[in-house]
Each structure stands twice: as C-alpha cells, then as structure tokens.
Image (tube, rainbow, N blue to C red):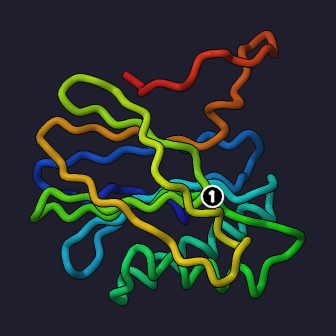
C-alpha cells in the first residue's frame, strides 16, 4: 500500500505539500496522493475507501491509478471523478464506495479547483483565521453511476493553508479508550 503513496511531493515554487498515513491495521482504505500533470498543474487528493483491510487497500490502489491516468491524459477534475465513478459502479463489489476530495492547483494562476465526493469538509486558513469549508457535496464515488460532479474554484493568496483529513482523525480515541470530543485542528 505504501508504494502507492507519494515518496516525494511536487516541487512547486511558493507551495508546500505534506501528508501522513497511519493505518489502524497493517493496511487500510485511507489514502492521499500528490502529483504534477503535464500542463504544470498539481493534483492533491485525500480519501477513504469503505471497509478495512486488504480489500479496501486494493480498491484504493485501483482508484489512485485511474485518477492519475485520467488527469495525465487531460480529463477535467469533474470529468475524472465521473469516469472513475462509472467504473466503480460497474465493477463494485460488496457495496464498496469511496469518499474523497480532489484539489487541482494551478500555480501559474494561484487558483485551486476543488471537488468533494462525499468526504468530510476541509479546513482553510486565510488571513490568520481557520474556517471549515463545506462545499456542495457530491455523493461518494461508486454509488450513483451517472452522477455529474461539481467543482469549486478558490483564489489563493500568499499564506493560505489547507488541512484535509479522513474519518480516522474524527474517530480517534484517547489512550484510555474514550472518544475525543474536539473537532480536529491543523497540526502545528
């Protein structure tokens, strides 16, 4: 599973990327990726395949491959999500689905296209203030075959920070076993 996660993040002047995966078991359906596409834009994604263990991890590997191929061959953010969604619906097994956020950064224009496919909201800091960003949610991938996915454009300013996470963060427990009551915040 680790071989599908980025070993290095794209080197884009003025931008920094980071990611961390700590599976609850040896493998999981949680994932992230970051890569540059031929036109110079950078795709960053985070998500979670339903279920746990090896089946979810294998599903995740397939999903990441399809997204990389689609974006590198010129599909739009909405187009690649629609294509992957149709494929997952046609070949889904045992009710598996995927939640994810796909960010597509255009560093030449300081613009970010974002699509949320049934995933948790993300946090954004601009001007020193953190806000939870709740976009019009698309459904998770693998549920509605012919669904069209919507995207949103965000203008970036210097110092803007994004923090996205999976439900592993919100479901984390204290060492004593009780659930955390606080919403996750950005790592410092």
The N terminus - image quarter: bottom right
Residue 166 shows in this picture: yes
Residue 96: x and y in percent read 79, 66
Count all numbered tags in the image, as a single digit.
1
Badge 1: few (under 14), some or many (20 or more) residues near its Cα, within 10 Å?
many
Is residue 26 found left or right of 6 in the rendered image? right
Is residue 114 found left or right of 23 in the rendered image? left
Is residue 134 found left or right of 170 in the rendered image? left
Residue 144: x and y in percent read 70, 75
User: Can you name the residue that lies furthest to the right here?
Assistant: 94
In the picture of the structure, the residue carrying the numbered disc 1 is 99
State the residue at coordinates (34%, 27%).
130
Residue 33 shows in this picture: no
181, above or below 21, in the image? above
User: Can you name the residue that lies furthest to the top here?
Assistant: 176
State the residue at coordinates (36%, 21%).
188
Foreground residue among 120 and 185: 120
Residue 20: x and y in percent read 49, 42
State the residue at coordinates (54%, 80%).
82
Is residue 6 found left or right of 112 in the rendered image? right
Helix, strand or loop under label 1: strand
User: Can you name the residue that lies furthest to the front here?
Assistant: 136
Residue 94: x and y in percent read 89, 70
Foreground residue among 121 and 179: 121
181, above or below 116, in the image? above
109, above or below 172, in the image? below
Quadrant in the picture for residue 31? bottom right
Foreground residue among 26 and 125: 125
State the residue at coordinates (79%, 10%).
176
């Amino acid at each position: 599973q680790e071989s599908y996660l980025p070993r290095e993040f794209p080197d884009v002047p003025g931008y920094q990327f980071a990611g961390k995966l700590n599976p609850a078991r040896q493998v999981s359906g949680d994932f992230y990726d970051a890569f540059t596409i031929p036109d110079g834009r950078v795709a960053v994604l985070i998500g979670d395949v339903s279920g746990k263990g090896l089946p979810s991890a294998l599903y995740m590997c397939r999903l990441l491959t399809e997204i990389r191929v689609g974006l590198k061959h010129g599909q739009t953010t909405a187009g690649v999500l629609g294509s992957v969604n149709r494929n997952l619906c046609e070949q889904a097994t045992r009710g598996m689905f995927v939640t994810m956020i796909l960010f597509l950064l255009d560093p030449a224009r300081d613009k970010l296209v974002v699509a949320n496919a049934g995933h948790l909201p993300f946090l954004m800091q601009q001007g020193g203030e953190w806000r939870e960003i709740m976009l019009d949610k698309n459904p998770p991938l693998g549920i509605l075959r012919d669904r069209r996915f919507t995207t949103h454009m965000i203008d970036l300013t210097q110092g803007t920070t994004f923090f996205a996470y999976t439900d592993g963060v919100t479901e984390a427990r204290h060492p004593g076993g009780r659930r955390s009551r606080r919403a996750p915040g950005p790592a410092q």
